[in-house]
Structures are given as C-alpha cells and as structure tokens.
Image: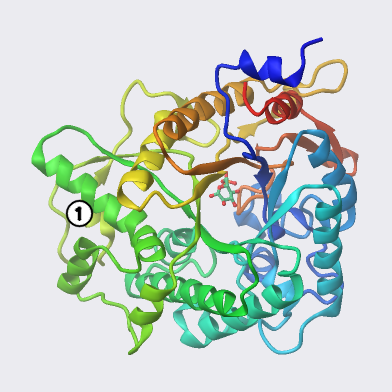
C-alpha cells in the first residue's frame, strides 16, 4: 500500500497544508425544534404559519433535519467523511427569544454542547451569527429597517463572543447579507416580502453597519481569533465587449457584489453605487460617525459563496420612468445560450467563475485571506439514484465539486490566498420556501424514515480528497 506521501506525489491537484475541508449549514435549515426549549419565533416560523402554501409541499421550518437532537451523530458523520471544519449558524431567536433582553439558558447549553462536540472531534467550528433568521420580535419593529435592531444584533453578537469565543476562533457576522435585501424588499422571496427599494437600501446599509459594529466589539475583546463575513459573489460577465454591455456589467457588479464586498474589505462603498443612489434619491440614512466605524472595522477573513455567474447586457428597452425604481433599470440579465445549467435550480454552472472571483479578490482586495464558504448543487428526486446497498450515487456532485476545485487550485497556484473549501451542505436540509425540494448534502436525510442519515457517494469521495489533501 502507498504511503500518504506517495499518494500525494501522484495527485494532480494538491492543496496547501492545513486546507480547510468541510461544509456549511444554518440553524433554521437544520436544527428543527423551532418552538422548543424557549426558542422565540423568527420570520420563517411566522411566515409559514401565515402562508404555508408558499413552501414546497407545505413543509415548514419546524421539521428540518433534527440537528438539535442528533448533532452528536451528525458530528461523528462529519468526521467520518473527512471534515476538519464545519460552519454552523447560531439562531438569534433561540438565544434571545425576544431578540434582546434575557438570554435563553437552554440555547446556551445547546450551542455549548455542539461546539464542545466539534472541538472534541477535531472539527473546527466556524460560527456565523446571522443567516436570514430575524427574530419575529425584531421584525415587528421593522427588522433591519430600524436602527434599534442594529444595536440588538450587536448585543447578541457580544454575548455569543463572550460565551463561545474561548473555543470558536472563526466568526462571521452575516451570511449573504444581500439576500434578505433582495428577498425581503425587492423580489418577494423572504418575509416581509415587500417591494420597496428605499427600505431595501436601508436594510442593506444597516446590515453592513451591524457587521462593522460587531467586528469592532470582537476586536476589543481580544479573543485571538478571526472575524469575517460571508458574501455570495456572482461574477458579472457582459454579453459583448460593446461599451454599453461592459458598463451594464460593471454596474451590476457594483450593485450586487461590491455593495458589500468593498465596505467589508476596504471600508468604503463603490463610487458608482453611491452616485446612482444619489441620482435616484435613494441614499440611506447614515448617522455621523458611521462611516468611521465602517472604515475602521473591516474583516480579517472573507467567505465566498459561489453558485452561479451573472450574464449581463445593456438595457434594450428604456425603462418606464413611472415604474418604481429597481436596479435592473440599468441592465438586463440574460441566459447565455448553450451554457451548462442545473435544471433543478435553473442556475448556470460555470466553474471558472470561482477562479475569476478569487483572482479578483487577490488583485483588487489586498489578497485578503478567504475560502470557499459555499458551493453546491441542489438536485430534485435524488432517491432515484439510491443503489441496492442504500447509497445515493451522486456522481454529478462529485464532478461538480471536482471541477470547481480545479479552478480553486489554479487560483492558489497563481497566488490567491485561499484557505479552504466548504460544500453547501453537510446533510440535506430545509431551504427557504423550497423546503426539501432540492437536496444538496454529502449525507442524505430520509424524511420518510424519521430523518435517517446515510452517506452519499460524494461523502465517501470527499473523505479521500480531505485525507489526501487533494485529488
Ligand atoms: C445559499 C444560502 O444562498 O444557497 C443557503 O446561504 C441556501 O441558505 C443555498 O440553502 C442554496 O439555495 P437554495 O435556495 O436552493 O436552498
């Protein structure tokens, strides 16, 4: 049998020593126990109660994958498939049922146990504080539109740093902060499903401010760890090199990527974005001193979620000047013919996109330490790939991960400061309105059999990749 050294010599794609191999997940999507042990309602619990029809097969967030009860079994499985790290999120409404005030001791016990179990298993916990799950009590006072909520979030973050920071050394303030802006206030796929660009901008701004303020606290506590943010970056590609297409693509990039990337890493907003907002009369309310806080409290570590590119062309028809403002007044998205698509999710699969993002971060963002914090492929009806031994043969996922990893590897070869790769997600989980429609996990969850877990072929493959530190 070959030694590890010999195996590694033969690898085509060998990753740097200490590379973070793992996956990511979020509280609302995995824990279940949504109304147990003192947890308060969050917007998903509430929205499901109000409009169950919005959710695929009417499955709500109470079900999810029972991580709350089965975390020990799950962490053992993480180890079994080669994880050296795992990202979870803390549920704000479990910690603070009313969003602020009294901390829920049962939640503290739960997260302490999960973190202890991860540490004891040698799976490093990466902890995110906000993954789309506003406590309902905070939403009732306006959610992120209300500046009071920014301070409540910072208080919640502070408590988490104090309670768990002795063992957690990688923190994240937010996951994909632009998604609640788009879903909640522009395109109707998150609660409170309003269409109001003025609120959207204020929500985005307050979220960003809450991140900088939490980072400030973290640094003051001197806990000897790193703090970052996780952004979904969708590289923008113009349809042609025609100046109008190029300009449209740059604007889409400023609005959807650089709006959070620039202030998080460089401490300031992109000039193009600010001038559009000024021109259109949509500047958010910014208080004196805010910009100093944002400038002084940039991230140590950047998580990059990458699923799909954005294909952009110049506007073909002039927008109706009477219509309420939306950023797509400046460009059109289009589907590039002949591209590989994930038919289940309708997303283009463009592996080189991950390389383009990483090289952009290297060249334009000071080569800040970063990692792929999500990348993954949701597939509907995976049960049909289960073989006679009960294993889901998800070769398409192995190919998907492998092809992306090749580009990650190339970026590293060319000097990008990339420290790891986390798949979305560890086990099949509940998703925002899509519920259990598309499955993403290394581990399947059989809802018909009391959420029984079983490792898919991709999980076994990933174990080898992680053990060999390459493939
Ligand atoms: C990311 C989110 O945007 O994509 C996850 O961080 C989400 O929460 C994942 O589940 C996949 O998207 P979806 O909508 O297919 O579940």
Q: Is residue 203 visible?
A: yes
Q: Picture coordinates of residue 443 (x, y %)?
A: 77, 35
Q: Nearer the viewer, residue 211 or 363?
A: 363
Does residue 97 appear to the left or right of 414 in the view shown? right
Q: Which residue is mark 1?
A: 330
Does residue 286 appear to the left or right of 99 in the view shown? left
Q: Picture coordinates of residue 219 (x, y %)?
A: 55, 75
Q: Residue at x 48, y 42 (%)?
A: 306
Q: Picture coordinates of residue 410 (x, y %)?
A: 44, 28
Q: Nearer the viewer, residue 43 or 250?
A: 250
* Displayed quadrant of residue 332: top left
* Displayed quadrant of residue 267: bottom left
SS class of the residue under badge 1? Answer: loop
Q: Residue at x 72, y 41 (%)?
A: 428
| Quadrant holding the N terminus | top right
Q: Nearer the viewer, residue 44 or 212?
A: 212
Q: Residue at x 77, y 16 (%)?
A: 3
Q: Picture coordinates of residue 64 (x, y %)?
A: 76, 52
The residue at label 1 has a CB less than 8 Å from ligand 1:
no
Indicate whether 139 appears above or below 445: below
Residue projecting furthest to the left: 243
């Amino acid at each position: 049998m070959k030694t590890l050294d010999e195996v590694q010599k033969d690898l085509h794609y060998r990753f740097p020593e200490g590379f973070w191999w793992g996956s990511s997940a979020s509280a609302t999507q995995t824990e279940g126990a949504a109304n147990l042990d003192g947890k308060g309602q969050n917007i998903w619990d509430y929205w499901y109660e109000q409009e169950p029809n919005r959710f695929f097969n009417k499955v709500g967030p109470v079900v999810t994958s029972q991580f709350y009860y089965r975390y020990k079994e799950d962490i053992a499985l993480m180890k079994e498939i080669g994880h050296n790290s795992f990202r979870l999120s803390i549920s704000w409404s479990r910690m603070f049922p009313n969003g602020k005030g009294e901390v829920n001791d049962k939640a503290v016990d739960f997260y302490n146990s999960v973190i202890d179990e991860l540490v004891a298993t040698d799976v490093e916990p990466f902890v995110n504080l906000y993954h789309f799950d506003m406590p309902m009590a905070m939403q009732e006072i306006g959610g992120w539109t209300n500046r009071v909520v920014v301070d409540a979030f910072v208080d919640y973050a502070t408590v988490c740093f104090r309670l768990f920071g002795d063992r957690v050394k990688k923190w994240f303030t937010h996951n994909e902060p632009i998604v609640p802006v788009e879903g909640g206030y522009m395109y109707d796929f998150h609660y409170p499903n309003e269409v109001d660009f003025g609120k959207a901008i204020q929500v985005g701004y307050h979220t960003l401010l809450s991140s900088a303020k939490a980072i400030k606290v973290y640094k003051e506590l001197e806990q000897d760890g790193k703090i970052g943010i996780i952004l979904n970056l969708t590289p923008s590609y113009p349809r042609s090199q025609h100046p109008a297409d190029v300009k449209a693509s740059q604007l889409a990039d400023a609005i959807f990527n650089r709006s959070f990337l620039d202030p998080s890493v460089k401490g300031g907003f992109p000039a193009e974005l600010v001038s559009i907002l000024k021109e259109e009369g949509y500047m958010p309310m910014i208080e004196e001193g805010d910009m100093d806080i944002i400038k002084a409290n940039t991230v140590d570590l950047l998580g990059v979620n990458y699923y799909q590119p954005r294909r952009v062309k110049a506007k073909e028809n002039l927008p109706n000047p009477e219509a309420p403002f939306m950023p797509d007044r400046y460009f059109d998205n289009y589907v590039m013919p002949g591209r590989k698509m994930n038919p289940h999710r309708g997303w283009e699969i463009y592996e080189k996109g991950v390389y383009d993002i990483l090289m952009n971060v290297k060249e334009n963002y000071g080569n800040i330490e970063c990692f792929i914090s999500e990348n993954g492929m949701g597939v509907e009806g995976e049960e049909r790939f289960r073989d006679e031994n009960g294993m889901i043969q998800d070769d398409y996922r192995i190919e998907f991960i492998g092809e992306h990893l090749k580009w990650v590897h190339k970026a590293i070869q060319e000097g990008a400061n990339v420290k790891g790769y986390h798949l979305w997600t560890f086990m099949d989980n509940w998703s925002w309105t899509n519920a259990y429609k598309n499955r993403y996990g290394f581990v399947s969850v059989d809802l018909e059999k009391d959420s029984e877990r079983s490792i898919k072929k991709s999980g076994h493959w990933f174990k080898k990749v992680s053990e060999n530190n390459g493939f």
